Image (cartoon, rainbow, N blue to C red):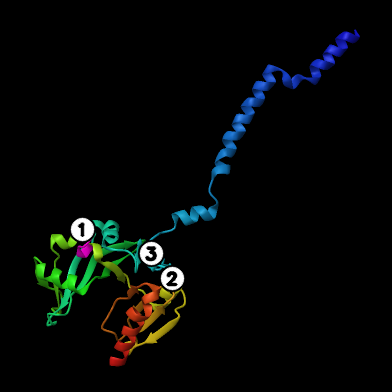
Amino acid sequence: MSELSSASEASRSTWWLRPIWLATAFVLFVLAGALLFPVWTRPAPATEAAASAPQGLPWQVKATPEGSEVFGLLVGQSGLPQAQARFGDNLHLALIQAIGAKDEDAPALEGFVERLEAGFVTGRLVLAFEADDAMRRKAAERSPKREVGSGGRVRQLSLAAEDLDVRNADSLASQARLVGLSFTPSVRLDEATLVDRFGEPAERVRGAGGDVQLLYPATGVAIAVPGANSPANRVVIQYVAPGEFEARLRQPLAAASAAQ
């Protein structure tokens, strides 16, 4: 009797070792893992929000030691090949020459994107490139097509194939450096909205007609906001490398203000 009692007690004490209980425990473990796995692997709410936030917006500007990063380009460092890779066939290049300019004056090398979708903001983008004066003059001589731009104040010269050949390290396209961007949003933006997006400017410069320039030298940004009596009716946002802000934006702005 004592042997049967001992066997019964041993059986009860090891019930969890029986095959049916082991199988049940295994199924429960698998089900629990399936339920908890999505919770463990789900991104944090902040990560999800950052991933779904619009990218490439005009006010998403990052200053770096090399320049100013915006619209997927590094102003002050990127070249024409990077701009072509970014915008593809939407990028149109031309040499821009003022009507009546002297022969020794080298034309400017510019690019145009007529409709840029910068996040949820659309607008027109102008790219300014820097290259050797002699190279630009020679490219102008080779231009296969010349036409007067809108307004009749400038002449647009298309570029010859050899000047656009990025495979040639000595071509104009290979030597050009992006030094500035000018973005004109399609929508009307007031000063309060711009300050809310870009932050408080380091300086405000008031002009005639109520115009105001919002200056952000730390990121290389200057925003021209037209006043109520201004002939301009659109905001223009300019971007340069922060290290070139003084020479490319502040000094020309000061000269224009003095001439008024």
Q: Residue 187 magenta-drawn?
A: no
**Residue 221 shown left or right of residue 114 in the figure:** right
Q: What distance separates the C-alpha of mark 3 from that of mark 2? A: 10 Å
Q: Which residue is mark 3?
A: 57
Q: Element type at marker 3?
A: loop
Q: Which residue is mark 2?
A: 197
For this orientation, the residue located farthest to the front is: 170
**Residue drawn at x 32%, y 89% as measured from the top left:** 257
Q: Residues within 10 Å of mark 2 (few under 14, many from 20)?
A: few
Q: Quadrant of the C terminus?
A: bottom left
Instruction: Tell which of 180 and 136 is nearer to you.
Output: 136
Q: Quadrant of the N terminus?
A: top right
Q: Which residues are magenta?
A: 168-173
Dot 2 and dot 1 residues touching (CB under 8 Å): no
**Residue 30 shown left or right of residue 160 in the figure:** right
Dot 3 and dot 2 residues touching (CB under 8 Å): yes
Front: mark 2 or 1:
1
User: Could you tell me the amino acid type at mark 2?
Assistant: Arg
Counting residues from the start of the chain, the first of labels 3 and 2 encountered is 3
